Amino acid sequence: MSGFYFQQEQLFAEQVPTLQLSAKYGTPLYVYSRAVIERNWRAFTEHLPAPHRAHFAVKANSNLAVLQVLAKLGAGFDVVSGGEIARVIKAGGQASRIVFSGVAKSDSEIREALTLGVGQFNVESKAELEQISRIATSMGKVAPISLRVNPDVDAKTHPYIATGLEKNKFGIPMAEAVATYQYAADLTGLEITGVDCHIGSQLTELKPFLDAMDRMLALVEELKAVGIEVHHLDMGGGLGVRYENETPPPVGDYLQGMLEKLKAYPNLALFLEPGRAIVANAGILLTQVTSIKASAKKHFIIVDAGMNDLLRPSLYQAWHRIENVAPAQAPVVHGDIVGPVCETGDFLGQDREILAKPGDVLAVHNAGAYGFVMSSNYNSRPRPPEVMVDGETSYLIRARETREDLWKTESLLP
């Protein structure tokens, strides 16, 4: 069951009316359901007994309370910056269950990760191998590493979130993988632990995952032939969710499809890094209609949330379901749902039919992933608050920024 549902002609977040939330905290407002986050996580872990392991992709939603909920469930975490490492530790996550990914790790981030004892570095290049080796050796540490290999599989997703083709900036080409592993084996301060790939995000078919896995298992065999044993296969994340008409495979089918291929490899653990699949449908963005602008050609439903609050529609041409949280007696309006940012690309939805009038509150669904984390202060707009609903209770887990927050790190000239 969704954590967001209609009852008595109002949209509820778990057991709290969203109109009550918007009145208490104001709009724009991000609202998350703890129950949905926990349910989505368990949908993965119930199919992944030890030694298999899931790591939440922190870049999808890095709020401390969200990470805390997952840490209490024993989650591992996939991070791409030192800042994300610090957030995981602050939220109660274990360093040993952190996978440190990312194409441009700094020396200071690597030192911090080694000091904390992160579980694994996913390495993107020979240059990064040399960088980690140099730092680990100087610190008297051994860095557990896995090479991110590019399997050149077309994920059939938006080009901005496709990562598994040779033209993408990520990973080591498959043709160079064995030689790069042999190079790593000769460096000091490194311990080869696994192989890694990630072919893209918002995938709605199982076949690309399985094709990539076949290529990665073939690589495992090639490595074994040259004397390099690995202990896990990290297949990344990328399982899609339903925004509009997508039909992603059920989590169980996705996991069992990959585990079936591992039956011939009993000593190889499967690592996964879901993000969107855990938090997307666990969050909504509430926004209030400020006015409706009518013209001969088009209507505009103007709201108080803009592209600085939710960038996905503008950046990815992403579609989010948008509806009135209390639609009774609201007229039908056909047009674009647009925000206050001074850009033509500032829209949340285009060519929509919606029940709305000035003062109404709208809910933008599936906003829990890549929502607040991609927000900005463009046009000097304070970022919205975040709230976690847990049954009948709501918790403010990030305060609304003030105007003073906008310039607190700036200085006037003397």
Image (cartoon, rainbow, N blue to C red):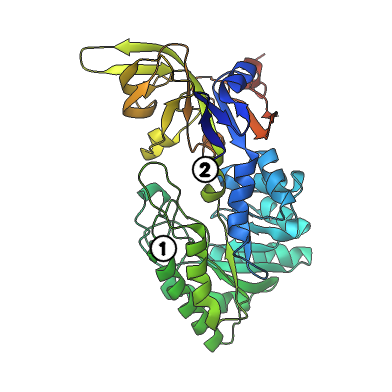
Label 1, on which residue? 206
| Of residues 376 and 241, the one drawn nearer to the viewer in this rendering | 241
Label 2 and label 1: CA atoms lie apart by: 19 Å
Q: Amino acid at mark 2?
A: Ala
> Which of the labelled discs sits on residue 228, or is there none?
none
Residue 208 in the image, given as x and y percentages of width and height: 39, 64
Which residue ends up furthest to the front in the rendered image?
A: 8
Residue 60 in the image, given as x and y percentages of width and height: 55, 45
Asked if residue 312 is positioned above or below residue 208 in the image, the reply reads: above
Which residue is depicted at the point 43% across and 74% down?
Answer: 215
Q: Amino acid at mark 1?
A: Leu
Contact flag, marks 2 and 1 (Cβ < 8 Å): no
Which residue is depicted at the point 38% across and 52% down?
Answer: 247
Label 2, on which residue? 280
Under circle 1, the secondary element is loop
Asked if residue 330 is positioned above or below residue 1 in the image, the reply reads: above
Which residue ends up furthest to the left in the rendered image?
A: 296
* Rendered-image quadrant of the N terminus: top right
